[in-house]
Image (tube, rainbow, N blue to C red):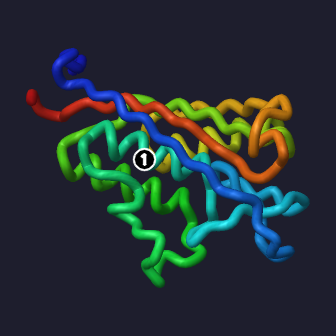
Amino acid sequence: MAANVNDLRVGQGFDVHRYSDDPNRVLVLGGEHFPEHRGLQGHSDADVISHACTDAILLAAGLGDIGSMFPDNAPSLAGADSVELLKKAAMALRDAGWRVINVSCIVVLDDPKIASKREVIQKRLSKAVAAPVTVAGRRSEGVGALGRNEGVAAWAVALVSSESPL
């Protein structure tokens, strides 16, 4: 059944993490590991792509944000797999009568280039939310904190539909 325009909502997500000085911390983007690169600081795996996507779907459905569902001080979430958190958020959406139509995410970093792993990342995230997820990488062009290689940021937009008329 086609969604009525009144049953659609858009959510926007954002996440940023600074690089970690811990040599054992692995960079995780969209669930994909980049072991040859510095990891990001965070309570979970600090996956900015998954975090931005999670915020986007939760905010679209009016279900709070990633921090309210998955607090960054919960001991049980230390080192958590953020794709699994995204999957749980998508399940909460379905339980609340919503479904994800699509998610689009842009990650800003100069290195690594994600193009070689984009397909794997998109398939993994699409499976987690049960809808198409697209990811693109952009360079910082040397601007600001991201250009000084202090961290990585990601923005996401999600479209969701109510399973029943609002």
Residue at image x 47%, y 84%? 75
Residue pushed farthest front? Answer: 144
Residue at image x 61%, y 50%? 16
- Position in image of residue 53 (x %, y %): 49, 43
- Position in image of residue 151 (x %, y %): 74, 52
As drawn, 106 above or below 6? below
User: Is label 1 in a helix, a strand or a loop?
Assistant: helix
- Position in image of residue 77 (x %, y %): 49, 75
As drawn, 129 above or below 102? below
**114, 18: nearer the viewer:** 18
Left or right for 108, reference 16: right
**63, 153: nearer the viewer:** 153
- Position in image of residue 9 (x %, y %): 28, 28
Q: Name the amino acid type tagged 1.
A: Asp
Residue at image x 55%, y 50%? 50
**109, 129: nearer the viewer:** 109
The residue carrying pointer 1 sits among few (fewer than 14), some (14 to 19) or many (20 or more) residues within 10 Å by Cα, namely many
Left or right for 135, reference 53: right
Left or right for 93, reference 124: left
Left or right for 62, reference 117: left
Examine the image and state in which quarter residue 82 appears.
bottom right
Q: Which residue is mark 1?
A: 55
What is the quadrant of the N terminus in the image? top left
What is the quadrant of the C terminus in the image? top left
